[in-house]
Image (spheres, rainbow, N blue to C red):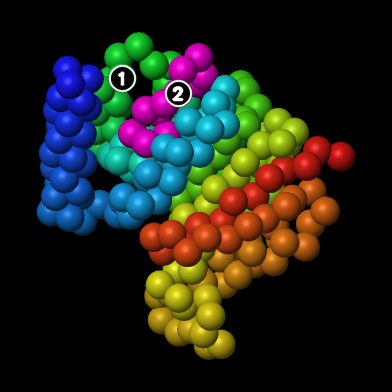
Amino acid sequence: MLALAGLKKNTALEKKLLAGLQKEAAFKKIPIIDESVGRFLELICLLTGPKNILEIGCGSGFSSYFLIKNLKDGRYTGIDLNKQRVKRAERFIRSKFPKKQFKILVGNALKLIPGLQYNFDLVFIDGAKYEYPKYIKTLENKLESGALIIADNIFYKNKIFIKETTGHDLNSVKGIKEYIRYITNSSSFSSYFFDVGDGISITRFIKK
C-alpha cells in the first residue's frame, strides 16, 4: 500500500508540474508538443535506453522533460534559437534532474550539428518545419547505426493532405512533404507514421 501511495503522490505531482508548464506556454505563446507526444517520447526512451539524445527545437524544456526523464547513463543535447527559452529550459531541467548529463545550445541547428562531439542514437525534431529536410540531411553523418529519428507535427494540422496550401503555412507544408519524400525514398531509412498529437514519424537509420 505504501508503494501505491507513493505512486499516487508522484503521479499527482507530475500532473501538476505539466499543467503548470502548459499554462505558462499558453500564456507566453510558446509552442510545445502535445502531451500525448511527450508520453510517446517517454516510452520510446524507456524501451530503447538511448545513450545520446539530440533535440532540435527544445523550446522552454517541456518536450525535454519527457526525453530526459528515463535517461540513465546517457547524455542529452538540446538546440534552440531562442536564448530566453534556452535559459528557462536549463533552469527547469537542472531543477528536476540535477544528476542527468545534459547541455542546451543556443543557435541554428544546421550550423551547430556538424560540430557536435557525439553521434546520436535518438533524435527528436521539432524545429522550423520548412527546415526538416535540411535537418535530416545534416544529421546523416551524426547518427549511430540503428538510430531513431522522431519528427513532430508531421501531419501539420492535416494540411499535408491538401493539394494546395497558401499563406504562411506554404513553406512549412512544402518542407514537411519534402522530408516525408526523403525518409521514405532513401535506402538509408525505414519510416513509420503515427496519428499521435499532430502526427509523428519514426525513422530508423540504416548505416551502409
Q: Is residue 117 above or below residue 137?
A: above
Residues marked 2 and 1 touching at CB (< 8 Å) = yes
Amino acid type at image mark 2: Leu
Query: Which sits in the foreground, 116 or 181?
Result: 181
**Picture coordinates of residue 50, whole percent (x, y):** 56, 27
Q: Which residues are magenta?
A: 65-75
Q: Which residue is mark 2?
A: 71
What residue is drawn where x is 20% and y is 26%? 4
Measuring from the top left, give residue 149's x and y in whole percent.
Answer: 60, 45
Q: Quadrant of the N terminus?
A: top left
Residue at 72 percent across and 61 percent down: it is 184
For the residue pair 3 and 87, the one nearer the viewer reads as 3
Q: Secondary structure at mark 2?
A: loop
Location of residue 141 in the rendering, given as x and y in whole percent from the top left corner = 73, 36
Q: Earlier in the sequence, mark 2 or mark 1?
A: 2
Q: Residue at x 14, y 50 (%)?
A: 23
Residue lying at the far bottom in this picture: please name it.
164
The residue identified by callout 1 is 97
User: In this view of the protein, can residue 3 be seen by the observer?
Assistant: yes
Q: Look at 31% across and 37% down and name the residue there.
A: 61
* Residue that extends furthest to the top in the rendered view of this protein: 99
Vertically, is 96 above or below 175?
above
